[in-house]
Image (spheres, rainbow, N blue to C red):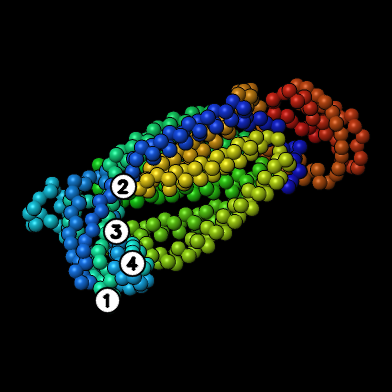
Amino acid sequence: MEDPDPNDPTMSINHYEWTTKKKTIFYLVFFILIICFSSIGLASLKITDTNEIDYVMSGNVSSFQISVNDLDRLNSFLHVVSTPYSEENIEIDFEMSYNISVYGNIKDKSDDPDELVSIHSSTHKREIHCEKKGKCSSDMIVNIPFLHYKNYDIFIVATSLAKEEIIGKLKIEVYKENKKFNLFMLFFVYIFQIVAIIYTAYYVYLLRGIPYQALTMEQKISLVYLFSAIISDDPLSPISVISDSTFIRIINIIFSTTFAYIWYGSFYFLFDGYRKLPKYRKEKSFWLHKIIIFGIMWFITILNESIGIAQQMKDVQTEYLDAPGSRFLGVISAIFSVAVIIWGIYLLIRSYIERKEVPNNQKSLFFTYSMCLILFFSFIYLLIAWFAIKDGNGAVMVTGLVVMIHLYVIFYSWATKPTRSMLSEIKGGDIKQFRDVEESSDKIDSGSSSGSGSGSGSGSGSGSGSESGPVSGSGSGSGSNSDPSSEKIQMSSQD
């Protein structure tokens, strides 16, 4: 780890404060929100409405019709899952063939077959594994990610390709999105949308007039956090509710993925940046490779999502791995993810070990570790709640994680906002001195390499002092203002 540079003016600036009051508010708010959103899950606000139907297999064939009515744009998907049940006391693997025909009706429910529009027809085979006389493996046989019709009629012919008649019945589960949950999420998301917009405007207002060179790494990350949070909160959701355009929903997926990778990648900048002096963080060797790595991961994710959506719109029986290229992209994504996670753990452990050597002005190191721990334990708590709630209720997981990530963004920017002393320095015109010193820092570093000197001094006013210590070598001594109570930017003088 590099030694602090006495000629670096950012080392004496009190950019932000992580006070006991902020800690107390932070922990209190997180505790309250965890309780609130766990209660939402326990109140059975389910993500999906499920309808279960059992069909008897006649021989090796079963044909039936499923009607799903009164859908609107608050029901954003429709899934049909098939689960065979074996009557034989043997463990067996075989194939089942599903012939699916999907029809839609944009009007109210009508018995007139002429008003039905043929959407899709296909036949797929699925590998089935059955335990001894019991439940077999389940398969999603219909997946409609974007609903363009109000009513759907699905005709299914299920055929067992096993040599013997081992399937006694089929359990069909129809999933559609719960309207109440969707309305709750829209309301919840737009509360954060409004809060993010207001706080972003306030944060930008605080940073007005501050030159880019004077911003810390944490403040720059906070700006990126806030602007990406605004677009991640589905700003186009009202349009997607009014319009059934697939393009709008794909754009929302891109926005959310972008925010997720910005949020995830920022930890790598922080954990690696704490052990480096501000001037080293501006070099390409610090930030370029991180941007390239997370840019590649973002591109692979978007490409994989786009391929999957396009294939699902083409074939309602498509599974994730059926889409061309998904297996290859999945392997590449897995390799990248494992490598990046190992790298992140290494940076986290290294920065924690070297935390005592971090320069004094890096006040948010404790804050970042606190946030990581709280996010981790909150995730574990919500994961336990997910399995503890009957019928796989996922509302607590979805809303809880969204809360944690968005609160991290808001609290992090709140902890790194400029202090009053920094704002008063700006009004006093000291930022101009900061810029002048920063621009000449390279000259100072190059000048110090040609000779060495040591000296101490004291002074006031302009910050320059008189040399009082012995000087060795051919270099010149330097004086500095050592008054610890002053919050002004201290200037290093050079004779």
Q: Residues within 10 Å of mark 1 (few under 14, many from 20)?
A: few
> Residue 435 at x, y = what percent?
65, 34
Identify the mark at residue 48; answer none if there is no mark: 2
Q: Residues within 10 Å of mark 2 (few under 14, many from 20)?
A: many
Kindly check if marks 1 and 2 are in contact, taking CB atoms under 8 A apart as contact.
no
Residue at left offset 36%, top offset 60%: 308
> Residue 453 at x, y = what percent?
87, 39
Along the line of sight, the residue nearer the viewer: 381 or 454: 381
Instruction: Classify mark 4: helix, strand or loop.
Output: loop
Kindly check if marks 4 and 3 are in contact, taking CB atoms under 8 A apart as contact.
no
Identify the mark at residue 12; answer none if there is no mark: none
Q: Nearer the viewer, mark 4 or mark 2?
A: 4
Question: Of marks 4 and 3, which one's residue comes earlier in the chain?
Answer: 3
Name the image quarter holding residue 240: top left
Question: Of marks 4 and 2, which one's residue comes earlier in the chain?
Answer: 2
Query: According to the image, label 1 marks what residue?
Result: 164
Query: According to the image, label 4 marks what residue?
Result: 133
Q: CA distance from mark 3 to mark 2?
A: 13 Å
Q: Amino acid at mark 2?
A: Thr
Instruction: Classify mark 1: helix, strand or loop.
Output: loop
